[in-house]
Each structure stands twice: as C-alpha cells, then as structure tokens.
Amino acid sequence: MKKTTKKILIWVASIVGFGIIGYLSFVGYVIYSLTRGCGMDDGPFNAVLINQIKISENSEMFDLKNNGILILDNRTDSLSPTLTLKENGIVKWTLDTDTRNTKGYESTRIWKIRNVTVLKNTDPIKLNFTGHWTYGREAGSMKIDREDGENSFCLSW
C-alpha cells in the first residue's frame, strides 16, 4: 500500500471516529436532559415559603389524605399564585409560585394556575396544572414535600 493511500485511510478513520464520538456524546446529552429535572421543559422552578397570608374568596381547595387541604389562590393580577397546605385546620406552609425566584428566569412571571389535577394526595403531593406565564399558557407539573413544602415545578412548551 502506498504511503498516500495509508495517510488518506488514517485521515478518513480519524474523521469517522470523531464523528461517532460526537454523535454518541450528543445522544448521551439528550438522554441526560430528558431524565434530569424538567427535561427539555422550562424549569425546574422552586416556589418559596412565605408567611401565611389571607386566602381570597376565589381560591380553590383540593382534598388530600390525612385531613389535608391544598388551597390554590390565584391572587390579583400583580401577584403570583400561592399554594397553602392546611392539616386538621392548621396552616402548615404557604408557597409563592413566582418564577422570578429561579436563577435564569428573573424576567419571567406566572400569574395564574388553573385546571389543577391532584395526581398523588399523600407525600409527596403531585399536581398537574395549566400555568399562565410570560411565555403563554403551558402545561405544568409540580411535586411538593408535604412536611416542609420543599418543591419543584416545570412548565412544558
């Protein structure tokens, strides 16, 4: 075999090798993205614990196990929705769902959560909903630790 043919074969094999490594790296990244956090959706966002607030008359209530009630309050247009857990008539925690509290989303805002479905009413609490935010109306999902309110939620596009 001539030296030039050998060099060409080595060059082609190198390019193909780099292509295969690049492709496998990309596939790995996509799989990692889809299985971690929110996948390709926006988030994860974290609602923050706030002091108990007065719940408005237009709030929605969802029954949970162990004498629990989850209260969704879509406050006035200038404020983000809150979620409050009451157990045996006592407020355990209140969460403010403001997306601006999440790094990278400081210029966004959520102002309404509706069409809530409680998927799991024990611990952790799991919800699906429709969120109205800066980028429109999007499907959302949320997981909340019943004991301390630790949570994360995603909005899909």
Image (spheres, rainbow, N blue to C red):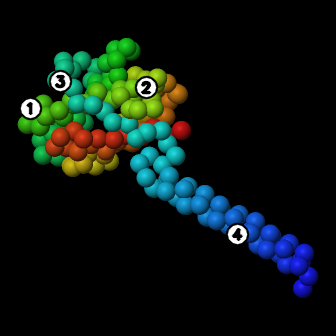
Q: Which residue is mark 2?
A: 106
Kind of residue indicated by mark 4: Gly
**Callout 2 amino acid:** Glu
Measured Cα–Cα span from mark 4 to mark 2: 42 Å
For the point 55% across and 55% down, the residue is 30
Which mark is first along the chain, 4 or 1?
4
Instruction: Tell me the distance, in whole angstroms, between the alpha carbons under discs 1 and 3.
Output: 13 Å
Spatial CA span between label 3 and label 4: 58 Å
**Residue corresponding to mark 1:** 90
The residue that mark 3 highlights is 51
Q: For numbered disc 3, what is the local secondary structure?
A: loop
Q: Is residue 27 left or right of residue 128?
A: right
Q: Are marks 4 and 2 in contact (CB under 8 Å)?
A: no
> Which residue lies under the disc numbered 4?
17
Q: Position of residue 77 (x, y in %)?
A: 38, 15
Residue 136 location (% of width, % of height): 52, 27
The quarter of the picture where the N terminus appears is bottom right
